Image (cartoon, rainbow, N blue to C red):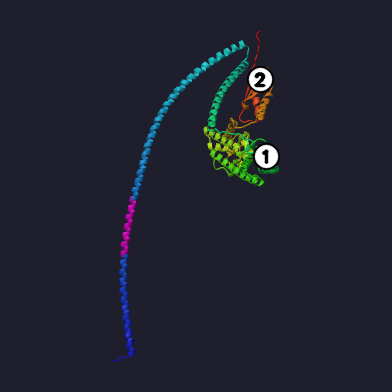
Amino acid sequence: MDLPQPAIVSAIAAISSAATYTLVRIFDKLYRISASERAKEIIQHAELEADTKARDAELRVKEQAIQLKEKNESEFQKIRDELYEKERFLDKRQDSLDRQADDQKKQERLVENTQRKLSERVADADRKNAELAKLIEKERFTLHEFSGLNREEAAEQLLILLDKELKAETGRVIAQHEKRIKERCDATARDMLLITLQRFAASHAAESTTASVDVPNDETKGRIIGREGRNIRSFEKAAGVDLLIDDTPGVVLISCFDPVRRETAHRALTRLIADGRIHPARIEELVTESHKEVQKFIMKKGKEAIQEAGLFGLNERLVELLCRLHFRTSFGQNVLRHSVEVAFIAGAIAAELGLNQKLARRCGLLHDIGKATDHESEGTHAKIGADLLKRYGEQTEVVQAAAGHHDDARLENPYTMLVMTADACSASRPGARRESLDLYVKRMEELESIAKEFSGVAQVFAIQAGREMRVLLTSEQSTDETAAKICRDIAKALTERVQFPGEIKVTVIREARFVETAR
């Protein structure tokens, strides 16, 4: 039977749907079966891995436990060894304490025996002292009866006698020690100064206030004077000096108290004579050039002095001031050379005494730095120098040495005394300073007049260039006791009223002379 076309299509679709559903169910069932099997496999694999990891973890735990056990056992063994050593030490200590206890017991027994014997001796001594006291009291009573003095009077006389003997003995001992110490100190100081001065021997030529320039002939003198004196006036005005031209053949004198201007004029005039062109313009030109040369010369001399003293790192301003001292003189002594000499002597003495040699040389080199500016400031050169050194950051020892090298300040460090000593040695050595005959005679007369002011003085002699004074006393107006006082008073008066380098030794002589004539 033939079916219509749509019905056939519907039937085929229904059959297809049923077949598709059946296949889907079959596939789903198969998938579930496959997923279950895979899940079982995963679970089995996970269980195997878990077992493996558990066994590994158990093995690691066991290994760690074994290692920890071994470590603990080694520590326990170490502790046991230490405890054993401590136990041995304690045993030895205990043995030592036992021996000490035995020795102490023996000492205690010995001390007890000694105390017992000592007590017996003390008792015996007390008994003898009591007997001796009775005898002394009996003798004292007998002595009082014979002397007629009571106990207080006798004790007073005895104390007076003992006091006199003690004073005499003390004075004798003190005099012996003072003499011995003075001899040793004088010998040590003399040797030290001799060694120091031998190591530094410097020649010195005293400065003058005039300088001479050689001229070839009188014609040159006339050219120096110039028409109506214009050349000489120009020279004196430019250089700040006085030219002395007289009948002395071949010499022109330059007079000036400023050594820098005098040296500048000397160089300028020498070059002017050699050049031959003498007129005001040329004079001013050569004076200016000579002044620059002198300044360079001063700086050179100052730096050479610093190098000679072995000191570096000075402030530039201090170097400039130190250079100025080359043309500064004191009693005819060049101040820069004097400073170098003081630096060397102070350093040598410091080396002998074990002090800082470099610091001593620095103090000695800069002690007179105030003389470079004392004409510009008020006060002594020591105070000016100390202020300058403090301003430019020098050490405290250097500042105090400059302030107190003339004993103007309290001594606070040994370097000040070193500089004072070196300054006195440099100033008082032979040839260091020059003094005119009139000043020398005046100073000697002043020293003698001070000593003659004291009563009892018959004659006074100043000898050794004023380093020593011999004073003769009259025996009628003085005694041995007053002679010592007069000697001390004269030394004190010289210290207070006279300024002098070094020291003056005062010797007082008192003697009695008796003259008879035999006929």
Q: Which of the labelled discs sits on residue 473, or is there none?
A: 2
Report the number of discs.
2
Is residue 367 visible in the rendered image? The answer is no
Label 2 or label 1, whichever lies nearer to me, is 1
Q: Which of the labelled discs sits on residue 298, or is there none?
A: none
Farthest top residue in view: 519
Give the residue at mark 1: 242
Residue 434 in which image quadrant? top right
Helix, strand or loop at disc 2? strand
- Dot placed on the residue nearer the N-terminal end, 2 or 1: 1
Q: Residue at x 65, y 15 (%)?
A: 513
Q: Residue at x 39, y 31 (%)?
A: 98
Between residue 323 and residue 27, name the one nearer to us: 323
Residue 168 in percent (x, y) is at 59, 19
The quarter of the picture where the C terminus appears is top right
Residue 206 in percent (x, y) is at 61, 34
Task: Give the left or right position of residue 508, taking residue 17 as reference.
Answer: right
The quarter of the picture where the N terminus appears is bottom left
Residue 368 magenta: no
Q: Which amino acid is tagged 2?
A: Leu
In the image, the segment drawn in magenta is 44-66
Farthest right residue in view: 228
Q: Residue at x 34, y 50 (%)?
A: 67
